Image: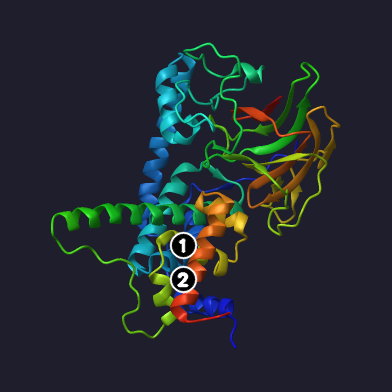
Amino acid sequence: MTDFHDELREALSRKASEAPRPGGIPEGVVRRARRRRAVNGTLAGALALTLAFGGFLGVRAAMDAAAPELREVPGSPVDPTPGPTVTASPSPEPTETTEPSPEPSEEPVNLRCGRTDAGSDEVFPDFVDVTFEDSSSPGRASITFHFEPMAGQTEAPWHIINFTDQLVTDGEGAPVDVEGEAFVAVTFMAQGVDLSGEEFVEIYTGPKEFHQGGPIILEVEQTGDFEGMVSWGIGLSEKVCYTIDAGPDHLTITFVR
Amino acid sequence: MMQARTLSVTESGRLGELYERHAPEAVRLGYLITGDAALSEDLVHEAFVKLLGRFRDLRNPDAFHWYLRKTVVNLARSHFRHARVEREYAEREGRRPAEQVDDDPTGRDEMWSALARLSERQRAAIVLRYYEDLTEAQTADVMGVRLGTVKSLVARGMARLREEMGSDD
């Protein structure tokens, strides 16, 4: 008996063979792409000017339009506070980058306890470093992924942060054993290896594993660098919520107990 | 730090090279999701405009393929969403709704006909898993949905395919 999956694959291949075969790139595509690039260049310049003169509201509206999911704070269906910020420029104090809340709050603004999916999938910085900070306060621990932005890049790269029962490697999906009671998978769009030349060139040359030993972050391990998506797994001593500070040159996750 | 080598996409030659390398695969993907030859080419053209228009420098051709695949899937989803709104409007107005995916009226390919009757999202998930051979996690990335959603879309789609094909495998 033919395996159903094989039958399905055959049907898909058969159908795919009927697909049109595109010839050369249509002139209209080239023309429209160039026009779009010109417009984007103009918009990027306008955005930089807006930021420089503190045009906060307009930029904020544009960012919200680009990433409406940033408004969601898991566990708070109706939350009047502004959503998390994807900062347009690096900040020396990650936890201070959240915008002022209309109401004073006991908890850090934008505390997240579930999935985060934010940033731009149209920027592609180099991934260059990982650093930690957990000594300043016993109830907080931060991990920062550092990027070298593309020329003119103003947005944080696309990033997904999520709790998971089992960390796995990208591609193969092989289990990754990391010490901890709760696990966080972090994936961001960046280049950790340059594949454009004849030989692979590692851009991120630091360790692929960090043994932090707590009190919050226990162990961190790189789980993949595949097709422009870099992944890390974080083992925590317990499940805690986190805040995000993301910009063109960094992604900081601060776990808050 | 080593500076990554850049692949400029500013020249028509480079654009053409990228197009020739990646467009056929993208058109096949679009065709399997939409079942429409002309639409699949339109989606791929639109995807190229979006991608080439946004990249000043494309440093990693592999990543381009990744972006392109994701963009085609997203554009197909937008198309179906738009088409659904149009259909609902046409039905409200008492007009004949537009056709959905061609389900092979000749009956030559039962499996494709069954695939065509799945929801667009189930079909996309199955195409990415069984034609593109992506993992569930990669499929979730491309579709912009959670891993659990992919598992559910694939499981339900496959169950319906089996039911329609009368397969016990």
**Are the residues at dot 2 and dot 1 in contact (C-beta closer than 8 Å)?**
yes
Outermost residue to the top = A104
Upstream in sequence: badge 2 or badge 1: 1
**Label 2 neighbour load within 10 Å: few <14, some 14-19, many 20+:** some
- The one nearer the camera, B166 or A199, is B166
Left or right relative to B28: residue B42:
left
Q: Count every numbered label the image shows and give the total.
A: 2
Left or right relative to A199: residue A58:
left
Where residue A135 sits, quadrant-wise, is: top right
Judging from the image, what secondary structure is the residue with disc 1 in? helix
Report in which chain the residue with disc 1 lies.
B
Work out how far the residue at label 2 is from the one at label 1, CA to CA, in angstroms: 10 Å
Residue B122: mark: 1
Outermost residue to the bottom = A1
Question: Disc 2 marks which amino acid?
Answer: Arg
- Residue A67 visible at all: no
Judging from the image, what secondary structure is the residue with disc 2 in? helix
Report in which chain the residue with disc 2 lies.
B
Residue name at image x 45 percent, y 56 percent: B72
Residue labelled with disc 2: B160
Residue name at image x 44 percent, y 44 percent: B53
Left or right relative to B164: residue A6:
right
Residue name at image x 48 percent, y 19 percent: A51
Residue B119 vertical placement versus B5 (above, below): below
Point out residue A242 in the picture as x, y percentages from the top left corner. Answer: 65, 28
Point out residue A33 in the picture as x, y percentages from the top left corner. Answer: 40, 47
